[in-house]
Amino acid sequence: MDSVDDVAVECPYCGETFCILADTRYERQDMVEDCSVCCRPIHLTMRFSGGELVSLSAEAG
């Protein structure tokens, strides 16, 4: 099982979708990532179970 996956994120500012790499070994990850389109900061909260993404929250940072 690979512990790094691409996760598609929809920017809360511009609405564009871009991908980030996420480590699925952890149950929860909180991070701030800049949108690759409009460069504004997005607060991401991701939850994983068994190496699979179960929830993603992308909020204006």
Image (cartoon, helix red, strand yellow):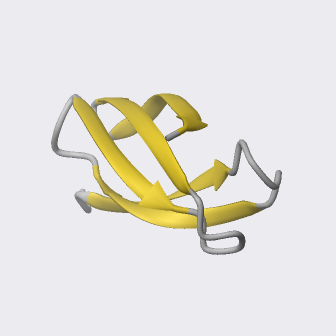
12 lies left or right of 35: right
Q: Quadrant of residue 30?
A: top left
Q: Is residue 24 above or below residue 46?
A: below
Residue beneath the point at 17% across and 38% down: 26
Percent position of residue 11, x then y: 69, 50
Residue 18 is left or right of residue 50, and the answer is right
Q: Position of residue 1 (x, y in %)?
A: 24, 56
Position of residue 12 measured from the top left corner of the image (x, y, whole percent): 71, 42
At 61% from the left and 74% from the top, the residue drawn is: 36
> From the viewer's perspective, is residue 10 above or below residue 57?
below
Depth order, front residue of 54/59: 59
Residue located farthest toward the right when viewing the structure as drawn: 15
Q: Quadrant of residue 40?
A: bottom right
Residue drawn 70% across the image and 73% down it: 37
Q: How many marks?
A: 0
Determine which quarter of the picture holds residue 5: bottom left
Instruction: Out of 29 and 27, give the one closest to the viewer.
Output: 29
